[in-house]
Image (cartoon, coloured by chain):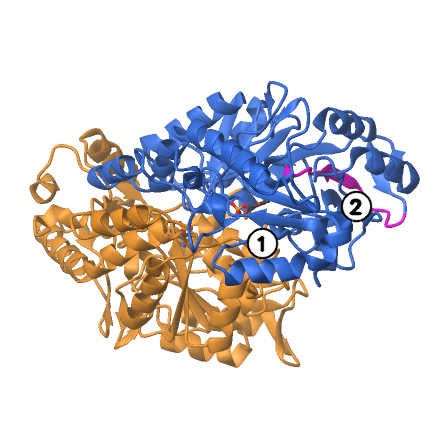
Chain colours: A blue, B orange
């Protein structure tokens, strides 16, 4: 591994700020526009929309808050259920909880690392029933209000199949595209298959604003409400303070949007670098038959945000030894998340059987993935 | 007014970034530490604690989120009630709603612009009863779980009296000190009279981080849980992703904390400038008997964050004409907020009679308050 990282000490993911980051941030400070109003917020929203092809992007304080609001906007109500992958970062489940709703866990598929659409279809046929226009979990009696696929490390879920399944069961579709800015299925960007999608610009993401996120959507009314609900629902007036619904302060400050604009200019370079890194790792590991670099599926283009080493089943029990040795040697590697079904606060939630997610969780190791590692930046 | 502002066009409040703001933010970008870890987050927390005298400060993404978490930490549960002033920014009520609780509105006092402790005491004697250790609203049957005083424009509420009242009724006390960094009662900083207090560093506040807030407290356990709950409740481990409760991503990025550190260095100067501005306005308006500059109460030290012109009752009906004329003349003035009891989503909430708050709302005009207006910065 060190033959690729070329360094005695290397992080899992470090951002690169050698473009216009400082210039844009300096401009905010020089002009005094660091907060909720300012040109970079509008510009970042416009450029995110342009890049992804969405009609609208609404930037927010982070991805978790963005997903919470997105779920509320598609109609998720307290006490309802939302289908999410068992194999995801805890934020996907937390956003559901913050709506007062319950996560309902779904198994993963080994070729995408994401939600298994075929298995979910069979499962819903068994456990759900249509009552009028709504999908009901027969066991709990609760409405299944939405499904949230997550594009793991930038590898797209099989969205065309999921769109069809969600429509058939009249379940709203919202994408957790936190990790997949720059990942496409055909010529459609991830996050654009459901009513809306969420992006994250956390410090470890392919493009960062320090902390931040966005809701992307083609739905004019939803975009308008997303903006309203994340900016205290203030009704425009020359001086009056009138707010017309319970709402949030989930704004992205202009200072952070400025960083985002500079980072977005460099996304092409980051994507090239990450793709190159996958090739270098694949070569470096090519004489070890027990491991392989996880690669994009045909017809999709992954952003290769986090480099993913797959252990063969017969060496899965060596995962922790490998993590220990590499971290001790200064090469920061990480396992994938503990399955959400194993966390104390989500253990009692509804779940389909998750044999594939359990297997994957034992076999994934993420490798150092900073874009500067290829030396090209 | 223009004799004070000295400019044909002047905003209500603009920040000043002529100190170390750029240097610190540049350091974040140069080192790559813009996000959730980084020295400025720790430093800003340490320096906020030192300045306010609190044992702990936990920085968060904004004041609204900070207040929500503070309320949850003192035990506010969904379906309970929280006493808040009818005269406040909508965020105070929204934070209560985000806990699933209901605002219950309290009248204001003309000498502090804040919660009227004596009137609240009489009101509680009528409407509340103690059942074991809890305070129950006899009309709704709901628990009254907490009271949240707010220090309007930096003018402190009569906290010693409120501390006593809250203790007598066994109601938790949490301060909305969003507007009162630099405001003291005797030698105790506002926000330090209850179990915990919230500060805001929104763009319009006396010290800004672009967007941000903090929870201050002397309670070690509460501070620890505040940090845990606002950072996804991750349990520390060399590489494992284990989270032990439903939690939030309410982190303040290091980039924003860097701005905060630089601003905090200049707080003394801002406070001096704002005090001076009050004197200048008071002089400028001294031959108009129908108006006066709102001044700090004896025994307290206000930060004079927003300059507050009080109209005499007999000219209150001219408020809108004054707002119109001054704004048309490029001098940005503002009325105080519409009473929360008049907003559609809070109209049906419990409320004591609010004659004083209603009267104040018709008589307050905020004047341009940027610290640079005195020319001293
Ligand atoms: C899959 C997934 N969902 C949600 C989030 C939450 O985004 P944020 O950290 O911006 O709140 C992240 C990133 O942290 C993520 O990786
Ligand atoms: C009284 C009051 N409470 C709460 C808040 C909310 O703080 P923030 O804007 O940081 O969410 C503010 C400031 O905006 C405020 O003035």
* A7, above or below A229, in the image: below
Q: Is residue B25 left or right of residue A99?
A: left
Q: Residue at point 27% right, 48% down? A: B25
Query: Residue B194 placed where, x, y %?
Result: 43, 73
- Asked if one can make out residue B79 in the rendered structure from this viewpoint, the answer is no
Asked whether the viewer can see residue B170, the reply is yes
Q: Where does label 2 land, which residue?
A: A356
Disc sitting over residue A161 in the figure: none
Q: Nearer the viewer, residue B110 or B51?
A: B51
Residue that badge 1 annotates: A334
In magenta, the rendered stretch is A139-151
| Relative to A138, A341 lies left or right | left
Is residue B307 placed above or below A176 in the rendered structure? Answer: below
**SS class of the residue under badge 1?**
strand
The Cα–Cα distance between marks 2 and 1, rounded to whole angstroms, is 19 Å
Report the chain holding disc 1.
A
Asked if A84 appears above or below B222 in the picture, the reply is above
Q: Earlier in the sequence, mark 2 or mark 1?
A: 1
């Amino acid at each position: 591994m060190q033959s690729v990282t070329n360094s005695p000490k290397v992080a899992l993911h470090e951002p690169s700020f050698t473009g216009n980051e400082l210039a844009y941030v300096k401009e905010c400070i020089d002009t005094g526009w660091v907060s909720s109003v300012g040109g970079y917020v509008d510009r970042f929203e416009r450029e995110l929309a342009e890049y992804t092809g969405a009609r609208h992007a609404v930037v927010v304080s982070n991805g978790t808050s963005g997903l919470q609001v997105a779920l509320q906007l598609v109609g998720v109500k307290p006490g309802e259920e939302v289908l999410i992958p068992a194999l995801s970062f805890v934020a996907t489940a937390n956003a559901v909880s913050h709506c007062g709703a319950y996560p309902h866990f779904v198994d993963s598929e080994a070729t995408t690392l994401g939600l298994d659409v075929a298995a979910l279809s069979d499962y819903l046929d068994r456990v759900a029933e249509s009552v009028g226009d709504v999908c009901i979990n027969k066991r709990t009696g609760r409405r299944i209000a939405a499904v949230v696929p997550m594009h793991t490390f930038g590898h797209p879920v099989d969205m065309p199949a999921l769109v069809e399944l969600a429509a058939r069961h009249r379940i709203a579709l919202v994408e957790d595209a936190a990790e997949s800015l720059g990942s496409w299925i055909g010529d459609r960007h991830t996050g654009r298959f459901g009513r809306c999608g969420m992006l994250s610009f956390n410090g470890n993401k392919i493009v960062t604003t320090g902390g931040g996120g966005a809701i992307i959507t083609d739905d004019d009314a939803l975009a308008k409400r997303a903006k309203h609900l994340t900016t205290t629902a203030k009704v425009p007036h020359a001086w009056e303070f009138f707010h017309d619904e319970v709402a949030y302060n989930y704004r992205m400050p202009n200072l952070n949007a400025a960083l985002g604009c500079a980072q977005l200019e460099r996304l092409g370079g980051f994507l090239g670098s990450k793709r190159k890194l996958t090739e270098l790792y694949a070569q470096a590991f090519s004489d070890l038959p027990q491991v392989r670099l996880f690669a994009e599926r045909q017809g999709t283009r992954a952003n290769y945000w986090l480099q993913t080493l797959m252990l063969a089943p017969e060496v899965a029990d060596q995962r922790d030894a490998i993590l220990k040795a590499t971290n001790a040697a200064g090469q920061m590697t990480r396992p994938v998340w503990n399955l959400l079904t194993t966390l104390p606060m989500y253990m009692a939630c509804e779940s389909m059987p998750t044999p594939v997610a359990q297997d994957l969780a034992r076999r994934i190791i993420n490798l150092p993935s900073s874009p500067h590692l290829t030396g090209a930046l």
